[in-house]
Image (cartoon, rainbow, N blue to C red):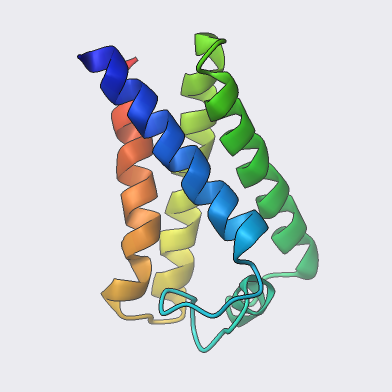
């Protein structure tokens, strides 16, 4: 049972990251920080330099791929989940920085919680 839950968490976190960074970066959502309409605008709203957008994006896509690869190579799951957890702590800090309502932080908090669960279950 536990192994199915771990697998489900890996897939949900991975697909969530890929959805945000590959399918919806140019789409407005109610979860974007500040008044941003796109992912790149969101990073600007946080006062982050442009390279941070590319660095964080690359790290999150890498983590997603590692989590999917972890289906076959289990040793990559924990480091990938730890990096996602750290990145989500940063995302939460940015939402706090711009005084976003709590609703905007829910996706980051959910990803953080699922990543923590993965780490603790492995």
Marker count (numbered): 0
Q: Residue at x 72, y 46 (%)?
A: 58
* Left or right, residue 60 beside residue 90: right
> Viewer-proximal residue, 29 or 45?
29
* Left or right, residue 57 beside residue 111: right
> Viewer-proximal residue, 47 or 70?
70
In this rendering, the answer to whether 113 lies above or below 67 is below
Q: Residue at x 54, y 80 (%)?
A: 28
In this rendering, the answer to whether 46 lies above or below 14 is below
In this view, the residue farthest toward the right is 51
In this rendering, the answer to whether 11 lies above or below 89 is above
* Left or right, residue 27 beside residue 71: right
Q: Residue at x 33, y 55 (%)?
A: 109
Among the 4 quarters of the image, the one containing residue 22: bottom right
Q: For the C terminus, give its image quadrant.
A: top left
Q: Position of residue 88 (x, y in %)?
A: 45, 51
Q: Position of residue 96 (x, y in %)?
A: 39, 72
Q: Position of residue 115 (x, y in %)?
A: 38, 36
Q: Residue at x 29, y 74 (%)?
A: 103
Q: Position of residue 45 (x, y in %)?
A: 60, 81
In this rendering, the answer to whether 98 lies above or below 57 is below
Say if residue 36 shows up in the picture: yes
* Left or right, residue 68 beside residue 93: right
Among the 4 quarters of the image, the one containing residue 51: bottom right
Q: For the N terminus, give its image quadrant.
A: top left
In this view, the residue farthest toward the left is 1
Say if residue 119 shows up in the picture: no
> Viewer-proximal residue, 17 or 113?
17
């Amino acid at each position: 049972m536990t192994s199915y839950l771990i697998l489900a968490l890996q897939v949900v976190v991975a697909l969530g990251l890929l959805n945000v960074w590959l399918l919806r970066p140019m789409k407005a959502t109610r979860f974007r920080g500040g008044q941003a309409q796109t992912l790149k605008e969101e990073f600007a709203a946080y006062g982050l330099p442009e390279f941070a957008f590319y660095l964080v994006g690359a790290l999150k896509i890498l983590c997603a791929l590692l989590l999917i690869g972890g289906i076959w190579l289990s040793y990559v799951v924990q480091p990938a989940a730890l990096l996602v957890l750290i990145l989500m702590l940063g995302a939460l800090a940015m939402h706090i920085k711009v005084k976003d309502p709590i609703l905007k932080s829910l996706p980051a908090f959910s990803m953080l919680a699922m990543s923590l669960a993965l780490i603790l279950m492995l």
